[in-house]
Image (spheres, helix red, strand yellow):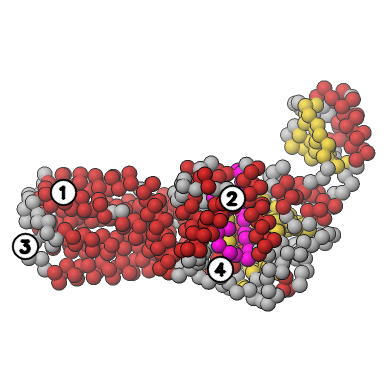
Amino acid sequence: MSAPFETVEGFSAFEPFAPAPRAALLPSLGAVYRAQLSRARVARIPLMFVATFQSLGILVMMRGVVGAHDTEAARDVVAGSAVLVVAFVALNLFAQYFGKLRATGGLDHYATLPVPAASVVLGTAAAYASFTVPGTLVTAAVGCAMFQLPWVHVWIVLAVIPLAGAALAGVGAALGLLAPRQEIATLLGQLGMSAALLLGVLPASHMPTALQWLRDLLPSTYGVEAFARTFTARPDWAAVAGDLAVCAAVGVLSLALSTWAYRKAATRA
Amino acid sequence: MNTVAAEPQAATATPATAVCCALRDVVKTYRVGRGAKATHIRANDGVSLEIARGEVFGLLGPNGAGKSTLVRQLTGLLRPDSGSIEILGHDIVRRPELAARLLAYLGQESTALDELTVRLAVETTARLRGLTAAAARGVTAEVIDELALGPIAARPLAKLSGGQRRLACFGAAIAGPRPLLVLDEPTTGMDPVARRAVWSAVDRRRREDGVTVLLVTHNVIEAETVLDRVAVVDEGRIIACDTPGGLKAMVDGSVRLDLVWREEAPTGLPLVAALAGRATVNGRRWAVRAEPDEARELVAEVTGGPAFAALDDFSLSTPSLEDVYLLLGGRHEGLEK
């Protein structure tokens, strides 16, 4: 037998062989973000229309029930519908995406690259959040016009989207990665979005106490409240900042959870 | 010859410094089903292997033999129930995260890359392998050029044919330097041009950089032409391990006579009845191993006598690795010729 080992002199005889360096967090996050954003252009634009039309539909429907002008209900409806676009993408689509990636073995690709788990989850979440921006802005603008609310502080959605987006995307990714089957991941994502819809759009003061507690547990609630507060004549900026801080804190926790879930899913037996 | 059938064993004894991968007594069991109906399947049943640096080493076996399970443990994706796995001196069972820094892996699925364009899939993978943006762009251009992916570089993987998609994924796997390439059925669905591009890219890396290649295949021709050594895997065990030539020497001297009957084999004829006892029967197809002289006589008898009327086709061939597999007691017909 001829052992064909003539070509091994490219390696030193010293053991162990030094492994290649890890990919750093931010550059790989950027690479994932860029790739996901390009992917979104191809595959996700139709879904963005769905998300936006869904929220616009809810605005029209609620307009029949809730009066215009500066009422608590009008503020909640507009803020809730706008944040719903984020919830649709971050919870529902994200749970589906990671559920599919796990079920089809696509996670192996990332798991055999020396890339931090956080880069993959955060990069993907950031890309998903980015393409909710137009839909959220359109919904907010249409809502302001329909319910005759002031536009001046609509810019706050640019803070609400990443913070509420991070909180919800973390939950969505964790659902997708931990669900035992792809269909269950999809189902959980749908349920989460339904919760965000019902608990976010309907005015809290009309709800039974048990539902109000549930509402307080939902990370998107704080995004909705932060946005709703800015419609008043003189917004309570401290309360807005407080709500956004809750979003940010939940975002950190839920992204940590999803990073853990990613590691668990990528190396599961 | 350093192989004995049906006995789990170390493949060779190469000097420690020349070893790239060393697996010892790797056992992996899966649970199938739930609750009381659950059964345990031994995907790997005490596998031991040594792969030398710079070697193109193959795992050959039918689908479900346990080849992919074995490489998934080597790549740190699965943890073995017991046994040890070392890559270039690192303990992969204890530190599975090191695998990603030592090897590049081409799995069977492409879902993570499907919606990216070929260029972006290769470039992103290179970035995630730790290359700088400029280096990743450079290596992407090289890979696209080397594999002749230019015409499809701007198209998303999901829109390509199976073979083209596989080639793009192979491109992603070789983007960025790694001393070990683990390729799980890399050429599935590829046309001959793409296959040639893959093997010349593999060969170049082996020749110029001393890269070691672990290849999973169920394609006999591929195994015979590209591998330095091959381990034959069946039902979770390595039943033989040698060079393709060394393995074929085990069945040397004999050739294979394939007979394809039109309908039922005419077992009423004495000649055919005598053959029935020693043939490997697969539906209308019979395979008989015989010494060359005897095989010639058999052909003459079968084609000259009354059996010829019932015969659809026949062929005589020199032994292949599939014959080795069958000789060693391989119980499946899943190898691709």
Residue holding disc 4: B101
Please give the range of residues in magenta. Answer: B168-190
**Badge 3, how many Cα within 10 Å: few under 14, some, many 20+?**
few
Residue A17 seen in render: yes
| Cα–Cα gap, marks 2 and 4 | 24 Å
Left or right: where does residue B145 sit relative to residue B311?
Answer: left
| Cα–Cα gap, marks 3 and 4 | 57 Å
Residue at point 23% right, 70% down?
A245
- Comparing B47 with A238, the one in front is A238
Numbered disc 2: what chain? B
Disc 2 with disc 3 on a shared chain: no
The number of numbered discs placed on residues in the rendered structure image is 4
Q: Quadrant of the N terminus of chain B?
A: bottom right
Q: Amino acid at mark 2?
A: Leu
Numbered disc 1: what chain? A
Pointers 4 and 1 in contact (CB under 8 A)? Answer: no
- A119 part of magenta stretch: no
Disc 3 with disc 1 on a shared chain: yes
